[in-house]
Image: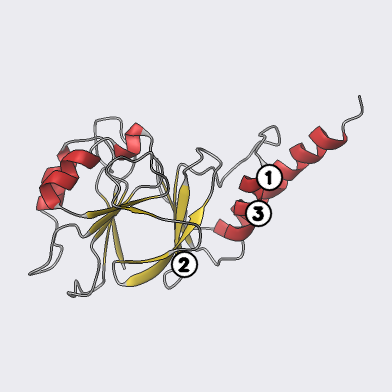
Amino acid sequence: MKIFNLTEHSTTYTSNAYLVLGDWNTLEDKNTLIDVGRDPEIIHTINNAATGVGKKKIDQIIITHNHYDHAGMLAEIKSLFKPQIYAFSGSVQEADHLVADGDRLRIGDNWCEILHTPGHSTDSICIYCEQNKVLFVGDTPVIINSVHSTYAADFIHALEKLLTKEITTIYFGHGQCLRENCNARISKSLENIKVNLEEYIYQPY
């Protein structure tokens, strides 16, 4: 699996947009964009990417959630490259397929799992690729340093599920990836949330 952040040097406010390819660009690999961002320069970058001889530039796009900075270029990229679009909810108008928690998709040369993580938005998903131990999180807040953050029980359950996976790299919707102590950092986030939850539940009147 090869991962490229196509908006890493963007001067426009945008999310990260990750191009995921197979190691050998075989015909069976699924050239995948995870989020598209909102910088028009991404079209030039895609056209110049080495995505494999005889292959479509983009086979599919997975949207981690429907916020504009992650999906702003979706309609234009769909029109130009004719990929299949996957998203969690019908709020992404251009989606061809709705995914559910536990679904598996081929991304590059890996099979990856969709995990519903409704913390940042109700339609937020993470994508876990077991073979490479990689997690794409969009804007899901998996790193929480404050004990004053409050999240609902379904997000706590989602973090608990993430911690059943071995994660060596986290690719965020904004900023640089994390390559050290990923499980430990998520575990600490969960601990911080539960501290606040216990204080909220058990605080005497």
Q: Check disc 3 and report its element: helix, strand or loop.
A: helix
Q: Amino acid at mark 2?
A: Lys
Q: Quadrant of the C terminus?
A: top right
Contact (CB < 8 A) between labels 1 and 2?
no
Q: Amino acid at mark 3?
A: Ser
Q: Position of residue 128 (x, y in %)?
A: 46, 62
Contact (CB < 8 A) between labels 3 and 2?
no
Residue 187 has which mark? 3
Badge 2, how many Cα within 10 Å: few under 14, some, many 20+? some
Q: Residue furthest left?
A: 54
Q: Check disc 1 and report its element: helix, strand or loop.
A: helix
Distance from the alpha carbon under mark 1 to that under mark 2: 26 Å
Q: Amino acid at mark 1?
A: Ala
Number of the front mark, 3 or 1: 1
Q: Earlier in the sequence, mark 1 or mark 2?
A: 2
Distance from the alpha carbon under mark 3 to that under mark 2: 16 Å
Residue 181 seen anywhere in this rendered image of the structure: no
- Identify the residue shown where x is 29% and y is 39%: 37
Q: Earlier in the sequence, mark 3 or mark 1?
A: 1
- Identify the residue shown where x is 47% and y is 45%: 124
Q: Check disc 2 and report its element: helix, strand or loop.
A: loop
Residue that mark 1 sits on: 153
Residue 38 has which mark? none
Residue that mark 2 sits on: 133
Distance from the alpha carbon under mark 3 to that under mark 1: 16 Å
